[in-house]
Image: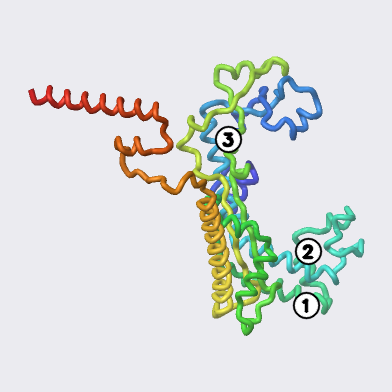
Amino acid sequence: MDYFSRDGCRTATGESAFNDFLLENAYVAKGRCDAPEECWKCSGEPCNEHFHLMICYQSPKTINTAMSFFRQRFNNYKNIYEHHKSKASSYMISDILALADPYYRLPGSKLPISLAMSNPDAYVKLKDSIIDIIELTDDDNLQPAKELIERYRSRKLYKRVTEQPVSSNVAWTQELWQMDEEKIVRDILEQSDSYMNLNSSDIIVDKMEMHFGMKEENPVSHMRFLPKSLLIETRNKPEDLPVAIKVDESNYECDTSKSYLQRSIRVFYKKLDGDGIVSKHLKDCFNALVERVKSECTQDSYDDTASLSDSVVDFGANINVCTQSPTKSDVEESPFVSNTKKRRMNGFGETLFKSAIDRLDQRHR
């Protein structure tokens, strides 16, 4: 909570997710485990019907606050951590370290940056200042890394060319999401004109995924709550603690979201493109790929429908399609109705007709 609060306050969003209310209303109680086969507590110790101690909250006054917290988590990822400027900066720093890795050695260990985790003494020296150290190191081999550092400091970041939202309800976007990043880059280059001189190393395909904390699921639906009347029992011994339960979404449906997971595919271009010609061409190539995937999914759907209609069983060539209720002659000529049922249907129809005539006579009288 304090991390979300810090990041929200220290950025341009100006939002804070920290709320003492949740901490002040947190209790320990028993609860049924959602996934006993994956839970270390249930697998490590014998549990009473998979009940064990959990952190729970007072119901109903903390439910809205909990949902607001998870929504703020999503907003932080959307506006800070996964923002296209933040991602471009992250990719640039990664490239700076990759360019310096073959030539720069960490002091005291002679290890490259990529192997720092194998030596604790070297790893603790790998701090944010590594960018400054690379910039000040006198080595001509580090010149490409230094040039990228200069570009990073001048805020000439990698450019986000385009972004395609991915919906769980749209088949072709799911098909696009299943494609790996390298294949998307290859398909983009296939759509590109040769005179543009695009290389795979110039393109970044980023699959962005943001959620409330549990992918497609509502995280509050996995929390446990206690009514106010049972809070006094939270002072009991562990074996005598009350049982906290889930709260149905119908009790806070105005605070729920239509979807808890958001996905999109973004394309970044690494090189500087002052007039934007290459970026526009790259966007057109990606849009051509999108249209191709869309048409392939549409064709597959059409083929499935056609095969389904071809598999319909033909019960006979003389079947008539009725656009209204069957008449008496239809019933008598039908090969699918037994003679006994025909007599019953005819008698039932005559009875209904007579009762209708009688009602009309009474109305006119």
Q: Is residue 224 above or below residue 320?
A: above
Q: Is residue 13 visible?
A: no
Name the N-terminal-most of marks 3 and 2: 2
Q: How many marks?
A: 3
Q: Which residue is mark 3?
A: 220
**In front of the other: label 1 or label 2?**
1
Q: Is residue 204 visible?
A: yes
Q: Which residue is mark 2?
A: 130
Residue closest to the eye, 7 or 335: 335
- Inspect the image, locate mark 1, and give the three-letter code of the amino acid beneath it: Gln
Residue 257 lies, in percent from the top left, at 50, 42
Q: Which residue is mark 1?
A: 143
Would you say 11 lies left or right of 199 here? Answer: left
**In front of the other: label 3 or label 2?**
3
Residue 318 lies, in percent from the top left, at 41, 47
- Inspect the image, locate mark 2, and give the three-letter code of the amino acid beneath it: Ile
Name the N-terminal-most of marks 1 and 2: 2
Residue closest to the eye, 270 or 181: 181
Crowdedness near tag 2: few (<14), some (14–19) or many (≥20) residues, C-alpha within 10 Å? some
Residue found 67% across the figure and 70% down from its top: 186
Residue closest to the eye, 330 or 31: 330
